[in-house]
Amino acid sequence: MSTTTTEVAGAAHDAAKAGMPQLDIATFPNQIFWLLVTLVTIYLILSRVALPRIGGTLANRKGTITADLAAAEELKQKAVAAEAAYNEALTNARSEAAKIIAAAKADIQADLNKAIASADAEIAAKAAESAGRIDEIRAGAMAAVETVAKDTAAELVGALGGTADASAISAAVTARLKG
Amino acid sequence: MAGEAQSEGGLVFHPLDQFMVKPLFGEGPVQWYTITNVTLWMALGVLAVTAIFVFGSRGRALIPSRAQSVAELGYGFVHDMIEEVTGHDGVKYFPYVMTLFVFILASNMLGLIPGSFTPTSHIAVTAVLGFGVFIAITLLGLINHGLGFLGMFWMKDAPLFLRPIIAVIEIVSYFVRPVSHSIRLAGNVMAGHAVLKVFAAFAPLVLISGFGIIVTPLSILAITAIYALEVLVAIIQAYVFTILTCVYLKDALHPGGH
């Protein structure tokens, strides 16, 4: 029985040798059997091991990229906020400094004004005092000049051999000085 | 066989020998369980798929290595294709579609190694794939939509008197789908390999006749060009088979195009 099937199969094989091996029906069960074995094997390898692993890797990568982008966006926002805060602080510091400068200027001006005023007053007082002293000295000088003139006149009169009383000489000198 | 050719004093033309299914160990008839060259090259395909998709992806690195990039590229390619064509509810059939794609691609690419055997050049293999897709998708459509699935053949936008005619055409084209689906793949792969072999048979002419001085370089040039074309065909046919599977799957999920 088995020899007959073998012979029949062999005959079919030989017949197909002349034409296309693709049409050799005797080899079909063999090809189909091994094809099914192969397909099941590939299916199991792919669905059990390879595809979940690759899918997981791709999802993981996508997640990482999304997270990284979100983190970058957050950091960018933070940087923008920090820049704004920095600018605000800078503006505040500038206005504060301007205020301090203005206050210092005002203080200095006030001190200066006060010092100038007191100095002016002092100068005025000193000038008035000096003027008084000058007047006094001038008056003293005038008096001295009169005395010296009277004495000189009396001495001159005595030296010239005249005699004159003091009051007449004094009146004459005073009259001359006025003239 | 070379000696035979010499004794005949001519060229050897056996372009179809490469498609022979032979037992790997010893001689004898090919039983369904016999370990044949089909077994060997399908097993190598499984190894290639394992190497790329299992060993390639084992790093799970955030920044992929080269092998991992290839595995992710293949994953993304098929995943995006199925999502684009069938919509979001088709994604749960992704492992099945991916299995088809990687099997066909591995088989086509390994088949380009000189002296190899190409399982996808056999109509028995591609017919199982094509009819498998056809039966699975028809059952899926009937289970999901019941008899409403048959509404796909009844064009509601067409004028009433045309509808029965269109229905007949649609039904015929529906049943032709698995045939064209499987013959397209096997035909493309087989034709390319046979043409390569024919040109290869002309190549040793320089050893036999004076014409060889012209014919041999030309045939080597032709082999190179056809080989490049075959690399393209290997990828494109895997892609075409997969995207058609997606398109058919879309019909089962959303009959009537909505």
Image (cartoon, rainbow, N blue to C red):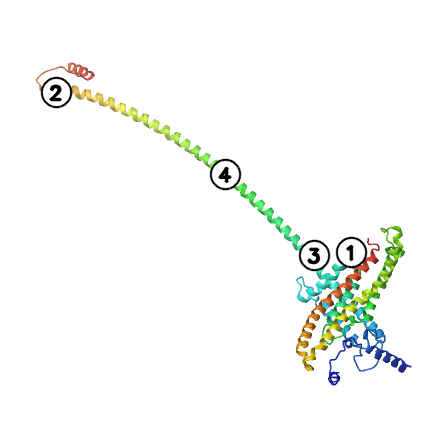
Residue B248, percent across and down? 81, 60
Residue ID for mark 2:
A155
Chain at numbered mark 2: A
Query: Disc 1 vs disc 4: Cβ atoms closer than 8 Å?
Result: no
Circle 1 SS class: helix
Query: Disc 4 vs disc 2: Cβ atoms closer than 8 Å?
Result: no
Residue ID for mark 4:
A98
Circle 3 SS class: helix
Cα gap from disc 1 to disc 3, whole angstroms: 20 Å
Residue ID for mark 1:
B88
Residue reaching furthest right? A1
Question: Does B220 appear above or below B143?
Answer: below
Tell me the number on the disc at residue A63. 3
Q: Amino acid at mark 2?
A: Glu
Query: Disc 2 vs disc 3: Cβ atoms closer than 8 Å?
Result: no
Q: Nearer the viewer, mark 3 or mark 4?
A: 3
* A93, B251: nearer the viewer: B251
Question: Does A106 appear above or below B114?
Answer: above
The answer to whether dots 2 and 3 both sit on one chain is yes
Residue reaching furthest front? B211
Circle 2 SS class: helix
Report the residue at 86% width, 57% height from top. B144
Q: Nearer the viewer, mark 1 or mark 3?
A: 1
Q: Amino acid at mark 3?
A: Gly
